[in-house]
Amino acid sequence: MKSFLNVEDLGSLSQALEEARQLKENRFQYERLGHNKTLLMVFFNNSLRTRLSTQKAAMNLGMNVIVLDVNAGAWKLETERGVIMDGDRSEHLLEAIPVMGSYCDVIGVRSFAGLTDREYDYAETVFRQFVEYSGRPVFAMETATVHPLQAFADLITIEEYKERQRPKVVMTWAPHPKSLPQAVPNSFAQWMMAADVDFVVTHPEGYELDPKFLCGARVEYNQQDALQGADFVYAKNWSCPGVTRPADYGKVLDDYHRMMHWTVDEAHMALTNNAHFMHCLPVRRNMIVSDAVIEDPRSLVIPEAANREISATVVLKRILQEL
Ligand code: AN0
Ligand code: CP
Protein backbone atom coordinates (compact mmCIF):
# COMPACT_ATOMS: atom_id res chain seq x y z
CA MET A 1 0.00 0.00 0.00
CA LYS A 2 1.65 3.22 -1.20
CA SER A 3 -0.98 5.58 0.15
CA PHE A 4 -3.99 5.23 2.40
CA LEU A 5 -6.89 7.63 1.91
CA ASN A 6 -9.94 5.67 0.81
CA VAL A 7 -11.70 2.43 1.67
CA GLU A 8 -10.60 0.86 -1.64
CA ASP A 9 -6.95 1.19 -0.58
CA LEU A 10 -7.49 -1.72 1.85
CA GLY A 11 -8.78 -4.16 -0.76
CA SER A 12 -11.21 -6.71 0.71
CA LEU A 13 -12.94 -5.13 3.69
CA SER A 14 -13.90 -8.47 5.25
CA GLN A 15 -10.27 -9.55 5.07
CA ALA A 16 -9.13 -6.29 6.68
CA LEU A 17 -11.71 -6.77 9.46
CA GLU A 18 -10.47 -10.32 10.05
CA GLU A 19 -6.91 -9.02 10.22
CA ALA A 20 -8.05 -6.40 12.75
CA ARG A 21 -9.72 -9.10 14.86
CA GLN A 22 -6.57 -11.20 14.90
CA LEU A 23 -4.32 -8.24 15.67
CA LYS A 24 -6.58 -7.26 18.55
CA GLU A 25 -6.10 -10.71 20.07
CA ASN A 26 -2.34 -10.23 19.93
CA ARG A 27 -1.26 -6.79 18.87
CA PHE A 28 2.43 -7.75 19.05
CA GLN A 29 2.20 -10.55 16.47
CA TYR A 30 4.34 -8.53 14.05
CA GLU A 31 6.64 -6.90 16.58
CA ARG A 32 9.71 -7.47 14.40
CA LEU A 33 8.18 -6.26 11.12
CA GLY A 34 9.07 -2.62 11.76
CA HIS A 35 12.57 -3.20 13.18
CA ASN A 36 14.83 -0.31 12.13
CA LYS A 37 11.97 1.33 10.24
CA THR A 38 10.95 4.86 11.11
CA LEU A 39 7.48 6.39 11.06
CA LEU A 40 7.28 10.18 10.76
CA MET A 41 3.96 11.68 11.86
CA VAL A 42 3.43 15.22 10.56
CA PHE A 43 0.74 17.29 12.27
CA PHE A 44 -0.53 20.55 10.80
CA ASN A 45 -3.43 20.40 13.32
CA ASN A 46 -4.09 19.34 16.90
CA SER A 47 -4.67 15.73 17.90
CA LEU A 48 -5.03 13.51 20.94
CA ARG A 49 -6.24 10.11 19.68
CA THR A 50 -4.51 10.02 16.30
CA ARG A 51 -1.17 10.97 17.78
CA LEU A 52 -1.28 8.44 20.61
CA SER A 53 -2.95 5.54 18.82
CA THR A 54 -0.78 5.75 15.70
CA GLN A 55 2.40 5.97 17.77
CA LYS A 56 1.23 2.98 19.82
CA ALA A 57 0.45 1.05 16.62
CA ALA A 58 3.96 1.77 15.30
CA MET A 59 5.42 0.60 18.62
CA ASN A 60 3.37 -2.63 18.39
CA LEU A 61 5.17 -3.28 15.10
CA GLY A 62 8.62 -2.45 16.49
CA MET A 63 9.00 0.84 14.60
CA ASN A 64 10.79 4.00 15.66
CA VAL A 65 8.63 7.12 15.67
CA ILE A 66 9.31 10.81 15.04
CA VAL A 67 6.54 13.39 15.53
CA LEU A 68 6.64 16.81 13.89
CA ASP A 69 4.17 19.48 14.99
CA VAL A 70 4.50 21.87 12.10
CA ASN A 71 2.95 24.74 14.06
CA ALA A 72 5.04 24.25 17.19
CA GLY A 73 8.71 24.81 16.49
CA ALA A 74 9.12 24.07 12.78
CA TRP A 75 9.50 26.78 10.14
CA LYS A 76 6.20 28.10 8.86
CA LEU A 77 5.51 26.30 5.61
CA GLU A 78 4.26 27.76 2.34
CA THR A 79 1.97 25.32 0.55
CA GLU A 80 1.10 27.19 -2.68
CA ARG A 81 3.48 27.06 -5.62
CA GLY A 82 4.36 30.30 -7.40
CA VAL A 83 3.94 32.72 -4.50
CA ILE A 84 6.66 35.30 -3.72
CA MET A 85 7.64 34.20 -0.24
CA ASP A 86 7.99 37.62 1.40
CA GLY A 87 5.57 36.88 4.28
CA ASP A 88 6.04 34.94 7.50
CA ARG A 89 6.47 31.53 5.81
CA SER A 90 10.18 30.70 5.72
CA GLU A 91 10.14 27.36 3.91
CA HIS A 92 8.21 25.74 1.09
CA LEU A 93 6.57 22.32 1.32
CA LEU A 94 8.34 21.41 -1.91
CA GLU A 95 11.69 21.37 -0.09
CA ALA A 96 10.36 20.35 3.32
CA ILE A 97 8.62 17.19 2.06
CA PRO A 98 11.63 15.47 0.42
CA VAL A 99 13.75 16.44 3.43
CA MET A 100 11.20 14.80 5.76
CA GLY A 101 11.15 11.76 3.48
CA SER A 102 14.90 11.40 3.79
CA TYR A 103 14.66 10.74 7.55
CA CYS A 104 11.95 8.05 7.55
CA ASP A 105 10.37 5.07 5.81
CA VAL A 106 6.67 5.87 6.23
CA ILE A 107 4.83 9.19 6.66
CA GLY A 108 1.46 9.95 8.30
CA VAL A 109 -0.05 13.36 7.57
CA ARG A 110 -2.70 15.34 9.41
CA SER A 111 -3.73 18.37 7.43
CA PHE A 112 -7.32 19.60 7.85
CA ALA A 113 -9.38 21.43 5.28
CA GLY A 114 -8.88 25.20 5.26
CA LEU A 115 -12.65 25.44 4.60
CA THR A 116 -12.29 28.55 2.40
CA ASP A 117 -11.31 27.13 -1.00
CA ARG A 118 -13.36 24.04 -1.84
CA GLU A 119 -11.39 23.15 -4.94
CA TYR A 120 -8.05 23.28 -3.08
CA ASP A 121 -9.39 21.17 -0.19
CA TYR A 122 -11.21 18.60 -2.31
CA ALA A 123 -8.15 18.15 -4.58
CA GLU A 124 -6.26 17.01 -1.41
CA THR A 125 -3.50 19.40 -2.44
CA VAL A 126 -1.29 19.00 0.65
CA PHE A 127 -1.62 15.21 0.95
CA ARG A 128 -0.96 14.70 -2.76
CA GLN A 129 2.25 16.70 -2.49
CA PHE A 130 3.46 14.37 0.27
CA VAL A 131 2.69 11.38 -1.96
CA GLU A 132 4.45 12.96 -4.93
CA TYR A 133 7.55 14.46 -3.30
CA SER A 134 8.38 12.37 -0.20
CA GLY A 135 9.32 9.15 -1.98
CA ARG A 136 7.62 7.28 0.91
CA PRO A 137 4.28 5.58 1.49
CA VAL A 138 1.92 8.18 2.97
CA PHE A 139 -1.22 7.60 5.00
CA ALA A 140 -3.97 10.01 6.05
CA MET A 141 -4.26 10.91 9.74
CA GLU A 142 -7.25 13.14 8.72
CA THR A 143 -6.70 15.13 5.60
CA ALA A 144 -8.81 17.82 3.94
CA THR A 145 -11.56 15.40 2.94
CA VAL A 146 -11.05 12.05 4.67
CA HIS A 147 -10.25 10.36 7.99
CA PRO A 148 -9.90 6.67 7.05
CA LEU A 149 -8.18 5.47 10.25
CA GLN A 150 -11.24 6.75 12.12
CA ALA A 151 -13.77 5.16 9.77
CA PHE A 152 -11.91 1.84 9.89
CA ALA A 153 -11.91 1.94 13.72
CA ASP A 154 -15.63 2.80 13.63
CA LEU A 155 -16.35 -0.20 11.42
CA ILE A 156 -14.29 -2.51 13.66
CA THR A 157 -16.38 -1.23 16.61
CA ILE A 158 -19.68 -1.82 14.80
CA GLU A 159 -18.57 -5.36 13.93
CA GLU A 160 -17.77 -6.02 17.60
CA TYR A 161 -21.02 -4.64 19.03
CA LYS A 162 -23.64 -5.44 16.38
CA GLU A 163 -26.49 -7.60 17.61
CA ARG A 164 -27.88 -8.48 14.19
CA GLN A 165 -26.25 -9.40 10.91
CA ARG A 166 -27.09 -6.18 9.06
CA PRO A 167 -27.51 -3.40 11.62
CA LYS A 168 -29.11 -0.04 10.90
CA VAL A 169 -26.48 2.69 11.24
CA VAL A 170 -27.63 6.32 11.32
CA MET A 171 -25.18 9.17 10.96
CA THR A 172 -26.74 12.35 12.29
CA TRP A 173 -25.48 15.91 11.95
CA ALA A 174 -25.45 17.73 15.31
CA PRO A 175 -24.88 21.39 16.22
CA HIS A 176 -21.47 22.94 16.91
CA PRO A 177 -20.40 26.57 17.42
CA LYS A 178 -17.48 26.48 14.96
CA SER A 179 -16.91 25.36 11.37
CA LEU A 180 -15.69 21.77 11.25
CA PRO A 181 -14.37 19.76 8.28
CA GLN A 182 -16.34 17.11 6.40
CA ALA A 183 -13.53 14.53 6.60
CA VAL A 184 -15.08 12.36 9.33
CA PRO A 185 -18.60 12.17 7.83
CA ASN A 186 -17.15 11.74 4.31
CA SER A 187 -15.09 8.73 5.36
CA PHE A 188 -17.79 7.28 7.59
CA ALA A 189 -20.28 7.38 4.69
CA GLN A 190 -17.75 5.90 2.28
CA TRP A 191 -16.87 3.04 4.65
CA MET A 192 -20.46 2.30 5.69
CA MET A 193 -21.50 2.06 2.05
CA ALA A 194 -18.72 -0.48 1.50
CA ALA A 195 -19.77 -2.49 4.59
CA ASP A 196 -22.74 -4.79 5.17
CA VAL A 197 -24.98 -2.32 7.05
CA ASP A 198 -28.23 -0.44 6.42
CA PHE A 199 -26.90 3.13 6.35
CA VAL A 200 -28.90 6.37 6.61
CA VAL A 201 -27.64 9.95 6.86
CA THR A 202 -29.67 12.76 8.41
CA HIS A 203 -28.85 16.48 8.41
CA PRO A 204 -30.52 19.85 7.95
CA GLU A 205 -30.90 21.04 4.35
CA GLY A 206 -27.73 22.64 3.01
CA TYR A 207 -25.33 20.13 4.60
CA GLU A 208 -25.44 17.63 1.72
CA LEU A 209 -22.18 15.65 1.53
CA ASP A 210 -20.20 15.35 -1.68
CA PRO A 211 -21.66 12.51 -3.80
CA LYS A 212 -18.13 11.12 -4.23
CA PHE A 213 -18.16 10.21 -0.53
CA LEU A 214 -21.89 9.72 0.03
CA CYS A 215 -21.69 6.82 -2.45
CA GLY A 216 -25.45 6.79 -2.96
CA ALA A 217 -26.32 6.59 0.77
CA ARG A 218 -29.95 7.28 1.70
CA VAL A 219 -30.50 10.80 3.08
CA GLU A 220 -33.47 11.42 5.36
CA TYR A 221 -33.87 15.09 6.28
CA ASN A 222 -36.23 14.34 9.15
CA GLN A 223 -33.94 13.34 12.01
CA GLN A 224 -36.70 11.63 14.01
CA ASP A 225 -37.71 9.48 11.05
CA ALA A 226 -34.07 8.58 10.36
CA LEU A 227 -33.47 7.46 13.95
CA GLN A 228 -36.40 5.01 14.00
CA GLY A 229 -35.10 1.51 14.65
CA ALA A 230 -31.41 2.48 14.56
CA ASP A 231 -28.89 0.06 16.08
CA PHE A 232 -26.05 2.58 16.01
CA VAL A 233 -26.32 6.38 16.16
CA TYR A 234 -23.16 8.09 14.88
CA ALA A 235 -23.24 11.81 15.67
CA LYS A 236 -20.99 14.38 14.02
CA ASN A 237 -21.05 18.03 13.13
CA TRP A 238 -19.80 19.22 9.76
CA SER A 239 -19.79 22.57 8.04
CA CYS A 240 -21.47 23.22 4.69
CA PRO A 241 -19.80 21.00 2.04
CA GLY A 242 -20.79 23.50 -0.66
CA VAL A 243 -22.49 20.88 -2.84
CA THR A 244 -25.82 22.63 -3.27
CA ARG A 245 -24.58 26.12 -2.30
CA PRO A 246 -20.91 26.54 -3.36
CA ALA A 247 -20.68 30.05 -1.86
CA ASP A 248 -21.46 28.60 1.58
CA TYR A 249 -18.56 26.13 1.56
CA GLY A 250 -17.13 25.72 5.06
CA LYS A 251 -19.81 27.80 6.76
CA VAL A 252 -22.07 27.14 9.74
CA LEU A 253 -25.39 27.83 8.02
CA ASP A 254 -27.59 28.71 11.00
CA ASP A 255 -26.91 30.11 14.44
CA TYR A 256 -26.34 26.99 16.51
CA HIS A 257 -28.78 28.20 19.19
CA ARG A 258 -31.55 27.55 16.69
CA MET A 259 -30.30 24.03 15.92
CA MET A 260 -30.12 22.60 19.43
CA HIS A 261 -33.07 20.28 18.73
CA TRP A 262 -30.52 18.23 16.69
CA THR A 263 -28.41 17.52 19.83
CA VAL A 264 -28.60 13.76 20.49
CA ASP A 265 -30.35 13.34 23.83
CA GLU A 266 -32.39 10.63 25.54
CA ALA A 267 -35.54 11.55 23.61
CA HIS A 268 -33.67 10.94 20.34
CA MET A 269 -32.24 7.64 21.58
CA ALA A 270 -35.74 6.53 22.67
CA LEU A 271 -36.70 6.42 18.96
CA THR A 272 -34.02 3.84 18.23
CA ASN A 273 -33.67 0.09 18.66
CA ASN A 274 -31.83 0.66 21.97
CA ALA A 275 -28.97 1.97 19.84
CA HIS A 276 -25.34 2.31 20.72
CA PHE A 277 -24.10 5.91 20.59
CA MET A 278 -20.90 6.65 18.65
CA HIS A 279 -18.72 9.73 18.07
CA CYS A 280 -15.12 10.00 16.89
CA LEU A 281 -14.17 12.46 19.69
CA PRO A 282 -13.28 15.14 20.62
CA VAL A 283 -16.91 15.93 21.38
CA ARG A 284 -18.59 19.00 22.87
CA ARG A 285 -21.06 17.75 25.47
CA ASN A 286 -24.55 19.20 25.39
CA MET A 287 -23.91 20.53 21.88
CA ILE A 288 -23.47 17.26 19.96
CA VAL A 289 -24.69 14.86 22.65
CA SER A 290 -26.20 15.13 26.12
CA ASP A 291 -24.28 14.06 29.23
CA ALA A 292 -26.79 11.25 29.83
CA VAL A 293 -26.37 9.70 26.35
CA ILE A 294 -22.57 9.82 26.24
CA GLU A 295 -22.35 8.42 29.79
CA ASP A 296 -24.89 5.65 29.15
CA PRO A 297 -23.49 2.09 29.07
CA ARG A 298 -24.65 1.87 25.41
CA SER A 299 -22.23 4.66 24.47
CA LEU A 300 -19.21 3.30 22.57
CA VAL A 301 -17.04 6.40 22.41
CA ILE A 302 -14.24 4.90 24.53
CA PRO A 303 -13.99 1.45 22.83
CA GLU A 304 -14.28 3.27 19.51
CA ALA A 305 -11.27 5.44 20.35
CA ALA A 306 -9.39 2.36 21.63
CA ASN A 307 -9.92 0.70 18.25
CA ARG A 308 -7.91 3.49 16.63
CA GLU A 309 -4.84 1.57 17.78
CA ILE A 310 -6.11 -1.51 15.93
CA SER A 311 -6.98 0.26 12.67
CA ALA A 312 -3.58 1.97 12.66
CA THR A 313 -1.78 -1.32 13.40
CA VAL A 314 -3.47 -3.00 10.41
CA VAL A 315 -2.66 -0.10 8.08
CA LEU A 316 0.97 0.23 9.18
CA LYS A 317 1.46 -3.54 8.98
CA ARG A 318 0.16 -3.55 5.40
CA ILE A 319 2.48 -0.65 4.50
CA LEU A 320 5.52 -2.31 6.13
CA GLN A 321 4.85 -5.59 4.35
CA GLU A 322 5.16 -3.80 1.01
CA LEU A 323 8.21 -1.65 1.77
C1 AN0 B 1 -12.02 17.63 13.93
C2 AN0 B 1 -13.06 17.40 12.85
O1 AN0 B 1 -14.23 17.62 13.10
O2 AN0 B 1 -12.69 17.02 11.74
C3 AN0 B 1 -11.30 16.35 14.27
C4 AN0 B 1 -12.14 15.15 14.54
C5 AN0 B 1 -11.38 13.89 14.66
N1 AN0 B 1 -12.65 18.13 15.13
C6 AN0 B 1 -12.39 19.32 15.64
O3 AN0 B 1 -11.64 20.08 15.08
C7 AN0 B 1 -13.07 19.69 16.93
N1 CP C 1 -10.80 11.13 16.51
C1 CP C 1 -9.62 11.75 16.32
O1 CP C 1 -9.00 11.69 15.24
O2 CP C 1 -9.17 12.44 17.41
P1 CP C 1 -7.91 13.41 17.46
O3 CP C 1 -8.28 14.64 16.66
O4 CP C 1 -7.73 13.70 18.91
O5 CP C 1 -6.73 12.74 16.85
Image (tube, rainbow, N blue to C red):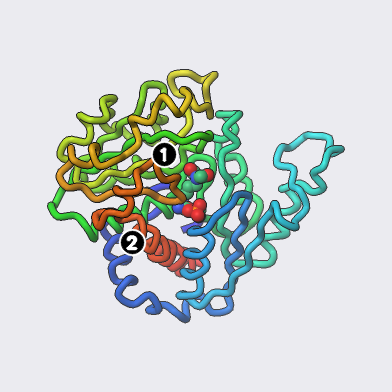
Q: Secondary structure at mark 2?
A: helix
Residue drawn at the location 30% of the way across and 75% of the way down: 25
Say if 83 sits above or below 204 in the image: below
Query: Given this view, does label 1 or label 2 mark the residue nearer the observer?
Result: 1
Q: Nearer the viewer, residue 30 or 51?
A: 51
Q: Give the image location of residue 17, x and y in percent.
A: 29, 60
Q: Does the beta carbon at disc 1 come under 8 Å from ligand 1?
A: no
Q: Which residue is mark 2?
A: 303
Left or right: residue 171 compared with residue 119: left
Which residue is at a point 70% across and 51% down the rendered structure image?
A: 71
Q: Residue furthest right?
A: 86
Q: From the viewer's perspective, tell me whether residue 22 is left or right of residue 272.
A: right
Q: Is residue 196 visible?
A: no
Q: Is residue 235 visible?
A: yes
Tell which residue pokes out farthest to the left in this image.
164
Q: Note whether 206 is above or below 35 in the view shown.
A: above
Residue beneath disc 1: 287
Q: Is residue 50 above or below residue 209?
A: below
Q: Amino acid at mark 1?
A: Met
Tell me whether the residue at label 1 lies in contact with that at label 2, contact meaning CB atoms closer than 8 angstroms: no
Q: Amino acid at mark 2?
A: Pro
Q: Earlier in the sequence, mark 1 or mark 2?
A: 1
Give the class, few, some or many, for how many residues have Cα within 10 Å of label 2's Cα (few <14, many ≥20): some
**Residue 12 sits in which quadrant?**
bottom left
Q: Residue at x 19, y 46 (%)?
A: 231
Q: Is residue 52 left or right of residue 263?
A: right
The image quarter in which residue 85 lies = top right
